[in-house]
Each structure stands twice: as structure tokens, then as C-alpha cells.
Image (cartoon, rainbow, N blue to C red):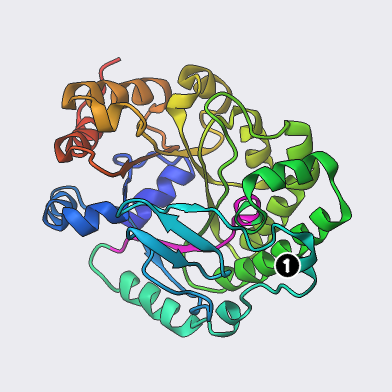
């Protein structure tokens, strides 16, 4: 069974030979532990790979994920207090609504897209002895992008007021991201990915009712574009998102990456097992950074006991973050390989 077939079988609940592997190594790992990262990938080959289609923005400056400042593709200035992390925006460029009148998205990212290069990557992958499941990442993250542009505090006030300016900003961001999703859907990748962080530690950041009113229709449109192109859909969201799993299933998301350990895993399994693929993860707030390999294995075992019936619906994903012990990341994949003890 090839990696690509294994992932398709997992997504379609067709009895893969094992859970596919996926690793998210944050920039700190490649900066400070490149040899350990390569050794892990050699020992536990990953089943997913990615391609890129979007062009460079004229607004980017500096080096992301390094101590200091950098400017992202929309012109937002980020402050990083340490290497290897994203940082924060402290001076949002649309903090004053008057700036919205002349602001434009970075359309050059769409205009400079290289579809041929993305498809060559996909073709090379398919020609390999063990082709991987190929995803095409997108910049689609409307809620977070609106926060980056307005500032989080301002945007939450905007959500309370639902002003005309708020909806103009939403439509501007949505227009760009529709074109971005349409472009990603034209690649030969197996899936497209998008994201938004929706949860606090204990609840959705806005009411589920307001989420369904304002954001769900946007997401449904992105998913419709991808589905019509024959793509699987992968979505990531941090925090407690139990309240919108049903909605994600309804609009066609195939795999969701969420912080399972923020929520009642067993309840999630009772309601959603067999209906959507859980694309990780293992607790990166407490267990991966501060636990032992044994506690890591127990965490994986908890997920597997709740969700792993051998039919699919699981991807063995974890995030390797700043200062996480290498042996804890190894323990994740060892535990996924071990016979399941009920």
C-alpha cells in the first residue's frame, strides 16, 4: 500500500493498513534541530507531502520566525520575541476604518501563481515508487486575517456591532480567498488545506449562532470550490471547537486538525467517529513539552482507544514545537505503530 493510497483509505474509511503519519515541525525545529528532524523522518517516513502555487507578495520584508520584526504578504508587521515562533501584530494596519477605503489585498500572489510548477511537483510525486498524498496549502484563513488587519480587540468589538465596515472588510478578505481557493483547486494535488483558529481553551471564541451566520457560508463556498474540483478538504483550528464539528462535516470537510485534548475525546468519538477524519493531534500544551515518553504513549493510547477501530478516520499527526524533547515526538509514532490495547 502506497502512502497516497493509505491516506485515501483513511479519509474514506476503507481499512488502511495503519494510520497515515504526518508531522508538523515548527520553524524552531529546522533552525535548531535539523539533524534530529531528518533522523525522525528517516525512521518514520511521513505519508503526506505538500506543494505550493502562490506567488510572492510585494509587501513581504524581513525573515519570518526570527527574533525581531517582519512584514507578511498583506503588509502586517509582526514582532517576534524569540526565534522559531510566529510572533504578534501590535500595530494593525486597519485599526482606523478610514484606511479601508484604499486598502487592497495582495493580488500579485494570485497573478504570479505558478500552476505549472505546482503540478510538476505533483507529477514527480506520482512517479515515485511510493507516492505520497499531496496537499496544496492556501492562505485561506478569513477570521484570523481580519484579526491581523484590524487587531483582535477591534475585531471582537466589530463582531459585537456588525457594522457596515466590518462586512466590507469581510467581503474584501473573502473575495481574495475565493480566488486563492479556486487557484489551489486547479492544481493536481489530492487535497487543499485551509485554517482558522476558532477556540479558546474552553469554548468557541464567538457564539456558534454568529459563527454560522457570518463565517459558515464563507467556508461552505470554499469547500464547494474544492469538492467540484475533486479535492479532499483538510481544515485546522485550535482550541475548543466541539460546537462546530457538525457544521464542518455538513459543508464537506474531510479531515480536521484540532486540539482534541482541549475537549472530551470520548464524547467526540461517540458523536463524530466514522463521519470525519481526525488529523491528529496529541496535546502540545502539556504532554509533548513537559511529559515523558510514557505519558506521551498513554496520550496516543487514549486517542486510539476512542477513535481507532481500524476502519480509518485517523491520521497520526503531531506538532513538534519549541523545546519539545525529541524522544517525546518519537514516542508518538512508536505508540501509533504498537498493537492497540483496549
Mark 1 lies on residue: 175
Residue 284 in the image, given as x and y percentages of width and height? 35, 34
Report whether residue 29 is seen: yes
Decide if residue 65 is in sight here. Answer: no
* Residue 118 locus on image (x, y percent): 43, 77
SS of the residue under disc 1: helix
Q: Residue at 51% across / 28% down in the picture?
A: 273
In the rendered image, residue 128, in percent from the top left (x then y), is placed at: 26, 70
- The answer to if 143 sits in the magenta stretch is yes
Q: Nearer the viewer, residue 270 or 295?
A: 295
Q: Position of residue 288 (x, y in %)?
A: 27, 32
Residue 339 in the image: above or below residue 56: above
**Mark 1 residue crowding within 10 angstroms, few (<14) / some (14–19) / many (20+):** few
- The vertical placement of 71 against 246, above or below, is below
In the displayed structure image, the side of residue 265 where residue 242 appears, left or right: right
Side of 240 relative to 39 (left or right):
right
Residue beneath the point at 32% across and 70% down = 125
Q: Quadrant of the C terminus?
A: top left
Q: Is residue 303 magenta?
A: no
Nearest the eye: 20 or 95 = 95
Placement of 93 over or under 256, stated as above or below? below
Judging depth in this view, the residue of 215 and 191 nearest the camera is 215
Number of numbered callouts drawn: 1
Outermost top residue: 342
Residue 196 falls left or right of residue 6? right
Image quadrant in which you'd find residue 341: top left
Task: Give the residues in magenta.
Answer: 131-145
> 42 above or below 289?
below
Residue at the location (46% across, 21% down)? Answer: 265
Amino acid at each position: 500500500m502506497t502512502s497516497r493510497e493509505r491516506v485515501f483509505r483513511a479519509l474514506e474509511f476503507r481499512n488502511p493498513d495503519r494510520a497515515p503519519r504526518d508531522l508538523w515541525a515548527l520553524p524552531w525545529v529546522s533552525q535548531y534541530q535539523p539533524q534530529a528532524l531528518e533522523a525522525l523522518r528517516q525512521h518514520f517516513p511521513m505519508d503526506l507531502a505538500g506543494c505550493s502555487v502562490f506567488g510572492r507578495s510585494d509587501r513581504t520584508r524581513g525573515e519570518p520566525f526570527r527574533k525581531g520584526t517582519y512584514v507578511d504578504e498583506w503588509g502586517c508587521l509582526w514582532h517576534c520575541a524569540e526565534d522559531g515562533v510566529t510572533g504578534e501584530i501590535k500595530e494593525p494596519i486597519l485599526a482606523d476604518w478610514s484606511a479601508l477605503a484604499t486598502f487592497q489585498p495582495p493580488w500579485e500572489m494570485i497573478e504570479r501563481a505558478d500552476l505549472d510548477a505546482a503540478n510538476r511537483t505533483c507529477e514527480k510525486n506520482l512517479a515515485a515508487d511510493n507516492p505520497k498524498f499531496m496537499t496544496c496549502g492556501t492562505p485561506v484563513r478569513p477570521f484570523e486575517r481580519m484579526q491581523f488587519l484590524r487587531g483582535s480587540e477591534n475585531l471582537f468589538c466589530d463582531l459585537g456591532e456588525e457594522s457596515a465596515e466590518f462586512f466590507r472588510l469581510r467581503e474584501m478578505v473573502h473575495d481574495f480567498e475565493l480566488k486563492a481557493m479556486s487557484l489551489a483547486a486547479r492544481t493536481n494535488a489530492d487535497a487543499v488545506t485551509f485554517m482558522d483558529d476558532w477556540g479558546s481553551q474552553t469554548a468557541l471564541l464567538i457564539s456558534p449562532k454568529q459563527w454560522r451566520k457570518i463565517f459558515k457560508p464563507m467556508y461552505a463556498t470554499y469547500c464547494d470550490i474544492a469538492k467540484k474540483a475533486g479535492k479532499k478538504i483538510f481544515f485546522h483550528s485550535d482550541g475548543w471547537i466541539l460546537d462546530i464539528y457538525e457544521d464542518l462535516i455538513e459543508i464537506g470537510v474531510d479531515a480536521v486538525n484540532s486540539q482534541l485534548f482541549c475537549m472530551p475525546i470520548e464524547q467526540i468519538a461517540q458523536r463524530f467517529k466514522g463521519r470525519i477524519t481526525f488529523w491528529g493531534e496529541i496535546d502540545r500544551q502539556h504532554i509533548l513539552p513537559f511529559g515523558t515518553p510514557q505519558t506521551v504513549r498513554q496520550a496516543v493510547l487514549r486517542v486510539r482507544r476512542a477513535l481507532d477501530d481500524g476502519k480509518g478516520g485517523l491520521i497520526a499527526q503531531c506538532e513538534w514545537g519549541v523545546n519539545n524533547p525529541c524522544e517525546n515526538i518519537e514516542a508518538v509514532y512508536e505508540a501509533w505503530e504498537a498493537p492497540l490495547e483496549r
